Image (tube, rainbow, N blue to C red):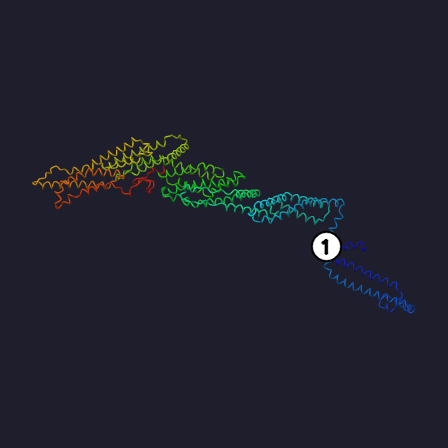
Amino acid sequence: MLIYIIPFLKKRDKFFRLFILSYFHFRVSLLEIRNLKLTDSDSTPAQLSGSPRLSQSTISGMDQSASGNDCKNNFCIDKLIAARKSLKLSLEKSRTLGLALEKAGPRLEEINQRLPSLEAAVRPIRADKDALVAVGGHINRAVGPAAAVLKVFDAVHGLENSLLSDPRNDLPGYLSVLKRLEEALRFLGDNCGLAIQWLEDIIEYLEDNRVADGMYLSNLKTSLKGLRELQNDGERVHLDGGLLDAALDKLENEFRRLLTEHSVPLPMSSPSLGEQACIAPSPLPVTVIQKLQAILGRLIANNRLEKCITIYVEVRSSNVRASLKALDLDYLEISISEFNNVQSIEGYIEQWGKHLEFAVKHLFEADFKLCNDVFERIGLDVWMGCFAKIAAQAGILAFLQFGRTITESKKEPVKLLKLLDIFSSLNKLRLDFNRLFGGAACAEIQNLTRDLIKGVIDGAAEIFWEIFFQVELQRQSPPPQDGSIPRLVSFITDYCNELLGDNYRPILSQVLVIHQSWKQKKFQEMILVNEVLKIIKAVDLNLETWVKAYGDATLSCVFAMNCHWHLYKHLKGTKLGELMGDSWLKEHEQYKEYYSAIFLRESWGKLPSHLSREGLILFSGSRATARDLVKKRLKTFNEAFDEMFRKQSVWVIPERDLREKTCQLIVQTVLPVYRSYMQTYGPLVEKDASSSKYAKYTVQGLEQMLLSLFLPRRERYGSFKGRPTGSKIDNGVDLRRTASAVA
């Protein structure tokens, strides 16, 4: 029996083994005592009196035997003593075993609970012999891929220290380790599913052949199901614990650091942006570009291109903005409501053209090239899109919007020149705009640029065609009351001269060509010249009308002198003068001489006749009569002079040379006669008590008065171009023909 039990005992708890062994030892001791009782017939009654199993007859027999054989009795007593000792020892062992059994009670209960599972574990041994033989091969085939996956997984964790270090210390080495991690993760991604499939197959085999416990197989199925779900959700973090994402984050930070440390704003040495200041920033060093490209390669391989572009755009656009900040571009934010008139921001428009050219040719050009260098391996669409975002965020849209604001403001005549300035700036940059912003990614910039150009061309053409009608409209207004040059005349001549100058004529011609083509009209080669001739002829007609509008003939002569001399003097040797021709200029000079002669004849030329010598014979008998006649004639002269001086002292001849010449002619007409008359007849009245009434002016005083005529009032006059005004150019009359024509 022990042969069968001992192997089983080897699997049990030590307390259980102790219990079984003690039990058998106790049974052996009892058997020995029984054998001793049955074979020992010579025991004495006294020795056996304590045993209840001895009968009276047996005791009697024993007493008789004892008396007959003492030696034999002694031997029996020794054996009983030995048996008692053995029994006593067995009882002590039993008592000890009992204590052990009391302590082993809970443990035995636990063993009792485990016996069913142990029984279930042993139960598969009864499975089919062939199935048991084949299960080993199936298990080996399933464990092989799983072991390979675990080995690679351990290798992934071995890269952790390297990938959590700073990439700047050894970027090539860092990228190499990262590539090894990517390869390991690809292996895990490709083989985890295979290993799981093998494990699922072996579980199915064990289940079909009842080679394993059902509970055990159920637990395995649950674990594999969880693994399958983790594999199917596509999250790599389950494979590397987030190590790859942490490494990629470090690469992104290194990408930003390289860009930031090597992106230096362009210093502005001159606010006026002279040529010495227009120096394009140095490109990034080749080594830096190579590092950026290497980082991009790994980030793109891990679907982080958009994050790279975001970082690149943020850093580079910030760099361009920092470069532009020194230009003081606050004027770009001016709204239409803040415009008083175009002249109030004339300086800003000039700066706008220089600033835009600098930004496009130097700042955006540099970033355009840099985008190509950094992202060239990825594709045209990517780096063009990246540059488009940089340009938009850096401020190109603000430049274009400022131009749009100018085109939408109130249309004034002087605005035409500013619109042509804007068009000129844009036209200079046309090739650069097409190259830099011609891609599909720059659609917003293209649309805003297109709208700006359309607004400039439409506005400039509209104002230009409106000039003739504006001149005609002014014909209905009264001429200046002081005989000065109408502001319209000075403005139109200067205006047309600028339009025909080398700066504006080609630009305006190009604008008109484009505008005509948009309206599907054929452009005439001389359309600009013909329109200017038409405008100047309208000015001439206005002058003729205004000359006739004066009620005072002498004032109309002063007005005519002023206008004809202005046209001759200011157009001679100019583009407009060349266009009008020498005969036209000479005609205006002759008109000036003609009206000057009439003016002198009809005004100051009449004064000497009041100082006639007729009837003045100086002899003693008629001295009193002569004195009275001189007084009368001096009084008439003084009254005529005072009236004429009073009236003409408010008249104006703006041109200094014409004014001085006219005054000299007046002096030459009046002063010699007055001097001679006073030298001859002055003594007759100087001794008289009322001489001051007749000898009112000295020769020097009269000359000074005549030379002070026709002086302009500076606060009332000046060039139209420099005065702070809107679209009204003369006597409160609006230069615009209608509100709808210009608005």
Q: Is residue 209 left or right of residue 42?
A: left
Q: Is residue 490 left or right of residue 275?
A: left
Q: Where does the image place residue 466, in percent across and percent down from the top left?
A: 35, 35
Residue 3, horizontal then vertical, whole percent: 81, 54
Quarter holding residue 507: top left
Where residue 226 sits: x, y (%)? 64, 47
Which residue is the site of mark 1? 114
Q: Residue at x 24, y 34 (%)?
A: 593
Q: Work out whether residue 585 can be spotted.
A: yes
Q: Residue furthest right?
A: 68
Quarter of the picture containing the N terminus is bottom right
| Rendered view: 445 above or below 222 | above
- The C terminus: image quadrant: top left
Rendering coords of residue 602 (x, y %)? 20, 36
Between 483 and 573, the one lying in front of the other is 573
Q: Residues within 10 Å of mark 1 (few under 14, many from 20)?
A: few
Where residue 78 sits, quadrant-wise, is bottom right
Q: Quadrant of residue 652?
A: top left
Residue 400 appearing in the image: no
- Which residue reaches farthest left? 621
Secondary element type, mark 1? helix
Foreground: 576 or 81? 576
What amino acid type should be assigned to the residue bearing mark 1? Answer: Arg
